[in-house]
Image (tube, rainbow, N blue to C red):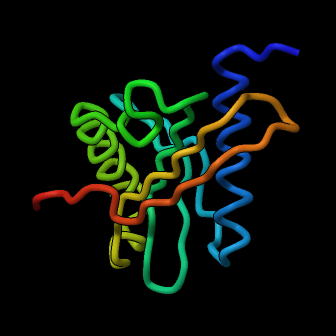
Amino acid sequence: MVMNSTQVGAWAEDIAWQHIQQRGWSLIARNFFCKGGELDIIVQKGDVLAFVEVKYRKNHTMGGAIASLSHAKQRHLIHSAKVFLQRYPLLSKLNCRFDLIAISGSDGPHSQVQIQWLDNAFITSG
C-alpha cells in the first residue's frame, strides 16, 4: 500500500512517539496547531519540556531528515512554542528545549527504520 504524505507524516510521528514513550517521557500534546505553525509532539520528563519536531526522509539524499530542519522551520517552531506557552503558562516554568527526531528508511508500517533523537537540536536566543 502506498501512503500519501499526510499518512507518512502520521506514521513517522507514531514511531517517534513510541520511541519517546519508551524512554519515560509523558505526553503533553500532539499536533498543536496555531496561526503560523505546528508542534508535532510536546513531552515532559521531570523539569524538562521538549518540543519535538519529527522529520522523515526515505533516504539520506540531500542530507536526510536532519538536514531538513531549516532556519525558517526553526522560526516557526519557536513561534508555535511561544503561543503554546502563552496558552499554558504553568508549563513555561519548566526548562524548555527543541528536539528533533529524524527517521529514515523505507516507508510502510513494517519497514526497518533508523531513528536519531537530537536533544537541543537548535538554540533560541531570548
Q: Residue at coordinates 89% horizontally, 15% vertically from top-left?
A: 1
Q: Nearer the viewer, residue 77 or 70?
A: 70
Q: Residue at coordinates 52% horizontally, 51% vertically from top-left?
A: 101
* Side (left or right) of 67 relative to 64: left
Measured as percent of width and height from the top left, residue 67 is found at: 35, 37
Measured as percent of width and height from the top left, residue 63 is found at: 38, 33
* Side (left or right) of 40 relative to 12: left
Q: Nearer the viewer, residue 96 or 107?
A: 107
- Quadrant of the drawing holding the C terminus: bottom left
Q: Residue at coordinates 11% horizontally, 58% vertically from top-left?
A: 125
Residue 103 lies in what quarter of the image? Answer: top right
Measured as percent of width and height from the top left, residue 23 is found at: 66, 75
Q: How many marks?
A: 0
Residue 119 lies in what quarter of the image? Answer: bottom left
* Side (left or right) of 111 relative to 55: right
Measured as percent of width and height from the top left, residue 106 is found at: 71, 30
* Side (left or right) of 56 relative to 36: right
30 in relation to 91, above or below:
above
89 in relation to 24, above or below:
above
Q: Nearer the viewer, residue 13 or 91?
A: 13
The residue sitting at the left extreme is 126
